[in-house]
Amino acid sequence: MKWNTPTGIRNIKRANIILAVLDALLLVAILALPGGPLSGFFGTDRLFDRPVSTAEPSATETPVAPAPAPVPEPAPAPDPVPEPATRPDREVPADRGVMTVHVSERGDTFFGLARSYWGDETLWPDLYLLNRDAYPDPDFIRPGQRVTIFQPLGDTDGFSASEKRRLADAHLEVYQIYRRFAESELERGRRLSSSSLLASSRVRLNRAYWSLYIGLKFDPGLLENTVVRADDARVVRSYLSRYGDIRGTAR
């Protein structure tokens, strides 16, 4: 077929139109590709056979928030300091009436109260043991607590043999109380790795030594008592040479 005949011309025009339409369709398809300027207009998800689901997500598809990290448990609180075993309070002789009842203030100690009311701080174990029902720990007096101040043992002229024995026994008993506190706090301090308990144990042990040392004032043979540990007796004997021989100095 010749192209310059009427029929040939019409066929050429028809082919050109078909090519133009195909070119237009191809251009539209390219522009409608994802990210193209016409992608939203033509809904490319449907155009390229990627249907968009409009159904609600199933329960299995619902996103689950991650579980929170477990909170570490707090460190266990230290056990309360056990009180040393006590014996029934000492009987108060009939001739030791009550001088007064002291309402304690911050900083009060049995050592200081014995000095204030009896004029001799070395008598404090006797005062403490007379009030022991309310004070299991000789180092702990709360403000507002009441301390019964009895008449002092003996008189200004000196102590009798029985009074010295009583005072020596009081020092010996306080030594044992401090010794039990020292051992208990040492064990707990090591178990809990507590520097404060370990320091308190050393303080208690030092006070146990001093209770024996002062007790020698009323009984020179106090260190021979069977309740005194041999290593404690050696420490107190070193005090005698370091601080002076106090044995048998009570009037």
Image: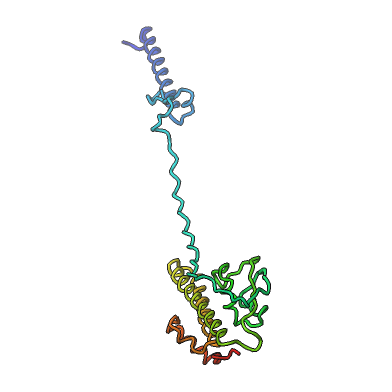
Give x and y (percent) for residue 25: 42, 20
Q: Is residue 155 above or below residue 70?
A: below
Q: Quadrant of the C terminus?
A: bottom right
The residue furthest top is: 6
Foreground residue among 36 and 102: 102
Tell me the quarter of the image containing the N terminus: top left
Position of residue 124 measured from the top left corner of the image (x, y, whole percent): 60, 78
Looking at the image, residue 114 sits to the left or right of residue 232; the answer is right
Residue beneath the point at 54% across and 92% down: 245
* Quadrant in the rendering for residue 8: top left
- Image vertical order of residue 162 relative to residue 149, above or below: below
Residue nearest the observer in this picture, 6 or 22: 22
Q: Is residue 226 above or below residue 72?
A: below
Can you tell which quarter of the image residue 145 is in? bottom right
Residue positioned 57% across, 72% down in the render: 139
**Coordinates of residue 190 in the picture (x, y in percent):** 43, 70
Query: Residue 49, relative to residue 240: is it above or below?
Result: above
Give percent across and percent down for residue 112: 64, 77
- In the rendered structure, the answer to whether residue 160 lies left or right of residue 29 reads right
Camera sees residue 93: yes
Tell me which residue sits at (59%, 76%) in the image.
93
Find the residue positioned furthest to the front.
Answer: 94
